[in-house]
Image: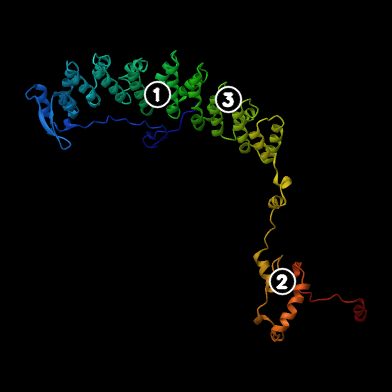
Amino acid sequence: MTREYIARDPRTGRPIEMNRRPKVEKKIKSETGPWVNLSQSEILQLFDGTVDSIPKRWMNATHSLTLVDAVRALGKFQGHHVQKSYPLLMQSFESEDPAIRVASLQVLPEVAVLKSDELFDWLSVLMDDSHPDVRKAASHCLSVTSPVFPSGVESILANELRSSDRLRSAAAWKGLTGLCDTWPEVVVDHVDSLLLEEDTMLRTKATKLLRKIVNRGDSAVWDLISWSLNDSAVEVRRAAAKTLPSLARKESRIATLFAERAIVDPDSDVRLSAIKAIQTLDSDHGRARELVLKGTRSKDVQVRSACIELLPRLFGEDILRTMASDLLKTETDATIIASLNEMTFDASLDGTEAQKNAQLAPSAPVPAIDREIAEAHGMRVGLEPERPQPLADKPPSEQSTTAAEQAEKKPAETATAPLYKAVSQDEMMGYDDDFEDESPDDDADYF
């Protein structure tokens, strides 16, 4: 593959703009609650046991905040103050109270942004906690931290994706889906390993993620799509085929190769996805034309219908009528036959008189200057009616004509005047024959 061009500053040589799709930054969203009103000194007092509870107003109500709320408020320690909150959080992981362990897992993502160190080791331990609430909180924490800390939760995520517990695996898949926006290359590694699993459901769910990263990944994603299209399970092949239309908009050549393979798949859904990819491809692509022509002879009615609908986009009217006539010889479906008959219809030959006339080219318009000259000499242009000459422009002898005389002359002129008067070029230009041919007798007298 050719390297992408990078514009550089001619003075410094540094890239002006990297021609690379920017990553989406995923930030940890801090949750709010009564604990946000606790100050750092009050949090330390609750941890030291100096006080058992502190009343605080929140949402028009008074709450009595305890050590659980103090743990939840450890995210308020920012900057260098995180050195005070980190030991308190590690202490909370070892608490015998399940509520405190749950609170420590809830605040873990906020603290990990500043200092992670051993936090994800504790997350791995609490995933198998004896209390169900703690395990549930740990699964939620994994789904939140996965898009931001892919390396920290890599092994935890790999195990949870294959968990037999439906809730734990659902949280892990949610985290892996979030990784598609932030770190697609990490998703490629997870999908690569999941496609080797014997469980069809795991391979299917992993293949469905390829649709989210097909426009953000590189050639590694193409390999995963290729492997999935060869999978023995039809569910996996269907999921892989649905990525082809999106791939066709980015990499037409790779999508054409995959569509050529998918269009002969025994499953009809896979073949239809291949047709959708071909519809997205450039109509001028030679290989795409071959796939469409091959599809017009397919045994699947849906594939034949879809390919025949593409023919007007790929070929001109003359070639299209010839191909449609050839396909009508073997076609048996009534709907496709009706569509082919429309392609073979030629309005200029088989249409009604009005349709044939509509195909004729209109005559060229008379130039404006020629029209003005003809009208100035009282002549008509084409089939247009002759315009009456204003009375002021007529000679005095003609102006005295009475209205009765004009009425008598008008029917006669209308009856005798031809519908169309041919105008010669000399008459239109206003030239008169000023000279007449001299007779031979005049020439004899002259001599």
The quadrant of the rendering that contains the C terminus is bottom right
Separation of marks 2 and 3 at Cα, in angstroms:
69 Å
- In the picture, the disc for residue 263 is 3
Q: In this view of the protein, can residue 294 be seen by the observer?
A: yes
Indicate the quadrant where residue 414 lies: bottom right
Q: Residue at x 45, y 30 (%)?
A: 215
Front one among 379 and 337: 337
Q: Which is closer to the viewer, label 2 or label 3?
A: 3
Badge 1 or badge 2: first in the primary sequence: 1
Indicate the amino acid at tag 1.
Glu
| x then y, percent, for residue 425 | 75, 67
Left or right? Give the position of 377 relative to 232. right
Indicate the quadrant where residue 121 lies: top left
Badge 3 or badge 1: first in the primary sequence: 1
Front one among 437 and 124: 124
Q: Residue at x 15, y 33 (%)?
A: 37
- In the picture, the disc for residue 379 is 2
Indicate the amino acid at tag 2.
Met
Separation of marks 1 and 2 at Cα, in angstroms:
82 Å
Indicate the amino acid at tag 3.
Ile
What is the number of callouts on the image? Answer: 3
| x then y, percent, for residue 234 | 51, 19
